[in-house]
Amino acid sequence: MSVTSTAAYWARRAAQKERVRILYRRALKDTLNWAVHRHLFYQDASDLRTKFDAHNHVEDVDTIDSLIADGEAQYNKWRHPDPYIVPWAPGGSKFTRNPVPPSGIEIVYDYGREDND
């Protein structure tokens, strides 16, 4: 292997590791949407980790790419149709319920304690 092909190989492997990490995190968060109780989630999360660890020994970059593509396709197929959104996060029911006041509005904190000079 030449220096450029070695660098290209390691760059591709780094990109693959990042894609696998992102896929695992998304799948884990989506598992929490499907599991109503924590004891169910822990078992599903353990099963998900077992699925990811089953292919931990694969070294061929093309095989890894196909495994990642299959995993992403399976994730997109089984995504939760109505994921849980934290109420105060964007898309949540409380998001911007109390928006910040517009610029130019001044808040007076010493109301009623003005100087009477």
Image (cartoon, helix red, strand yellow):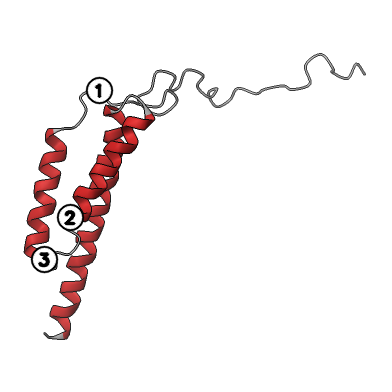
Q: Quadrant of residue 47?
A: top left
Q: What is the crowding at mark 3: few (fewer than 14 residues within 10 Å), some, or many (at least 20)?
A: few
Eyeballing the image, is 32 above or below 108? Answer: below
Disc with the residue nearer the chain's start (2 vs 3): 2
Q: Position of residue 73 (x, y in %)?
A: 10, 42
Q: Considering only order in the chain, which callout, 3 or 1, is on the residue closer to the N terminus?
A: 3
**Observer-nearest residue: 47 or 27?**
47
Q: Residue at x 10, y 58 (%)?
A: 65
Q: Residues within 10 Å of mark 1 (few under 14, many from 20)?
A: few
Q: Which residue is mark 3?
A: 61
| Mark 1 or 2, closer to the camera | 2
- Which quadrant of the view contains residue 85? top left
Instruction: Report the Cα–Cα distance between label 1 and label 3.
Output: 35 Å
The residue shown at (16%, 57%) is 55
Residue 102 rendering spot, x and y as whole percentages: 53, 23
Q: At x 12% / y 60%, what residue is drawn?
A: 64
How far across and how far down the image is residue 83, in percent? 28, 26
Mark 1 highlights which residue? Answer: 82
Image side of residue 97 versus residue 40, left or right = right
**Disc 2 target residue:** 54
